[in-house]
Image (tube, rainbow, N blue to C red):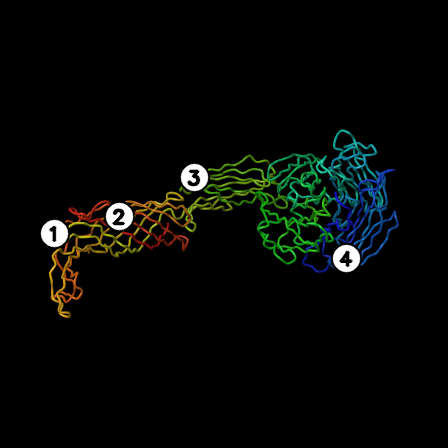
Amino acid sequence: MIGPLRPFLTLLMFVLLSAVTEARDPQFITKNSEGKEFWLCFMKNFRESAPNERPARSEGLKLQLFLTSSYDAKARVQIAQIGFDQEYVIKANTVFNVQLPPSAQLKASETAEQLAVHITADTAIAVYGLNSRFQTTDTYMGLPIDVLGTEYRAVGYTKLSGELMSAVSVVATEDGTEATITPTANTSTGKRAGQPFTVRLKRGDVYTIYARFESIGTCDLTGTHVSANKKIAVFSGHQCAYVPPKVEACNHLVEQLPPISAWGKHYYLGNLRERSRYTYRVIAAETSTRVFEDARLVAVLRAGEYFENLNVNRHVQVTADKPILVAQFAQGFRNGDSVGDPMMILVSPTQQFLKQYRFATPINGQWHHYINVVAPTGSISSIRLNGRRIDSTQFSVLGESRYSIAQVPVPFGTHLIKGDTAFGLYSYGFGYGADAYDAYGNMTGQSFFELDKLVDTLPPLADGRSVRDDYFVMFRDDRTSDRGMKSVRVLTSTALEAQIPKIDEGAPQVSVRLRPSAPGVSGRVVFRATDAAGNEADYTVCYVFDSRTERYGYILTPGSDAVCASEGAWMVGAWASIRHTYHNSSFRQSGNLTGEGVFTGGQGIGGWGGLLVGRRLSQDFVLSGRLSISSIGGELLSADTTRRQILDTSSGRSVSYTEGTLVGVSAPQMSIGIAAEFFPLRFFYVFGGLQTTLSLGSAADVRRTILEPSFAVYDETGERERSSEPTSLDSWNTLRFGVFGGLGATYPITFRMSVFVEGQYTTDFGNVLSDADWSLEDVGINLGVRYRF
């Protein structure tokens, strides 16, 4: 760490776990990091000052405990060798700080010391330890005796110097404890790597081994196996490590280890806010452990071996087919960030997540405090921090997993976070300004169920998502007891193509890509998914048209007997229309129709409706046949060229008098057409087609009309108009051809029925008369319904 010395209390991130239980009596709180009895120790931090050395990191050792409980509690702390014995009263939901003398730090190498820190309480409490010197600090979460075991593997780090090495400490909780240690590196007293040795310990003894510094190799005790005939507590870490190797500066690393029985198979690691990269290690408990990073096989480990990814710049999912331990490390400040220093967090497996955590940030100062929240994606809306929901936009999905992660800033103080579904929580912070180049981090708690007793009896799950015309089926086997996927195969397939990737046995997920063999053709495929434990499950994917979305879509159904009935390939419909017709004409005489002047175009409103039958050829195209019956609105006018004068009796003056001939078509017409509809958007389409129009007769409405003056009327009718000849047009074309097109919108109102509206333009190729210029075009609105079957 770089920067001025701060009171180490301000550097501590102590995490307070409040166990989730329906019972109010604290005796029901079990199998988590709260308890009534603890056996802890304080490993050697950095080194003691050498003769003539200027005091710096080697001075100012501070050893502290932080005790908390959801209930009022009485606690006792004892260290036999130095005669420390104190009792304390802890108020509910507060943190009590216990200062321990520096003499409580372990000193000996491979010699038992009565320096175990024994803590007892009258109710469940949580305990955290702080071990700090100037610029080298770390914390750990204490584990109660209830969750301790008899078999462990250590996690440490690479050598730094002869006095700054990886270390493992074993604490005996009972007399007559025999602990067998198999180091993965030569020890400082000469015990050989891979050669087990046994030590006999009495209650309260602490036995520590250090790696021996050698010029060749990492001299790392990571993976060291420790077993005993009785429950023991095991601590491991490093006196002061560079992470990654050769990246300054060093920091003390320490964690109390969970027993192998509490290790899991599924872990999620998130980026550390403000840091560009982090490092993680995976330690295997069993031989042939297959380790996956984001479902990609990255290592096959023997028992005690580890996989390390030195530089990770993203959130990752780490899984295995057998139990593993995962440690995440912040890197030294010289990794390019100029922020923080190394720290080590033991990551909780998803199988050990909790529904509630109580935690606190350090004393106020120039710090940015954060929590990483890892939760099932479907549950993030239920998570409340201090009673307020965390904004869901802060979460991002972890690869192709079912989990999401959020990096949430939190202010100085104590906090409570809870959710309806179990989730993981890690807390950390980085200093700035006067507190720059400093960092802290901790797991905030977990349950400690013995996962090694769980048997995988559940078959794989499946979910899917569409990407344009493709569909990706994600087969998953990543629950508490799952061992990962083994195979996916196609049982039957019709009109769908499946692309199944190479599967590394034990992978938590397998993504299979589907696509239709031919657009617009319904399809079906049945998969059989098998996990590494031999559990099988069948899933059916149907590719059918969905009238609710106006798209072909995929439906994923458990089982192999799903019927893929494609609805909506055929459709029938009916509509009513209103049309505005425009007449374009220029003639004086046609057949039996004669005008004194030129017949000029007019316009008018017509209407009625039609029927359609269609078939969807693809997701975006529909071909339909249309039959419509309509009237022709509007009239032509031929003004007489002859004008005469009449007397206006009201004024006594002569005024101009003019007549004209009006002609309209009273016979309906029937149009038969074929149209193509293209859907560029979900509910909107453009359409166009060709049509043949058949006139249902040649009846015409011909009338004489007085154009001026406005007061003149016909004597025989008393109106300004009177009927005239002819009553039909003998030059009217019975058959015509034309084109039409427009824009439409449709919206489903039931599973099979939808309403639609269209704006349509229609024009004929030629004239409606056989011997004169008279053409029609119209603009109309169609409103109707369609039924798919």
Outermost residue to the bottom: 650
Find the distance from the CA under tag 1 to the CA under tag 2. 25 Å
- Find numbered disc 2 in the image and state the secondary structure of the residue it sits on: strand
Find the distance from the CA under tag 3 to the CA under tag 2. 41 Å
**Of the two numbered discs 3 and 2 in the rendering, the one whose residue sits closer to the viewer:** 2
Towards the viewer: 718 or 528: 718
- Find numbered disc 4 in the image and state the secondary structure of the residue it sits on: strand
Q: Residues within 10 Å of mark 2 (few under 14, many from 20)?
A: some
Give the residue displayed 73% in from the left and 47% down from the top. Answer: 435
- Find numbered disc 3 in the image and state the secondary structure of the residue it sits on: loop
Tally of marks: 4
Q: Which residue was labeled with disc 2?
A: 763
Q: Which residue was labeled with disc 4?
A: 123
Outermost residue to the top: 216
**Of the two numbered discs 4 and 2 in the rendering, the one whose residue sits closer to the viewer:** 2
- Find numbered disc 1 in the image and state the secondary structure of the residue it sits on: loop
Residue 106 falls left or right of residue 590: right
**Which kind of residue does numbered mark 4 sit on?**
Thr
**Which kind of residue does numbered mark 3 sit on?**
Ala
Q: Residues within 10 Å of mark 1 (few under 14, many from 20)?
A: few
Identify the mark nearer the N-term, 4 or 3: 4
Q: Is residue 154 above or below residue 86?
A: above
Find the distance from the CA under tag 4 to the CA under tag 3. 65 Å
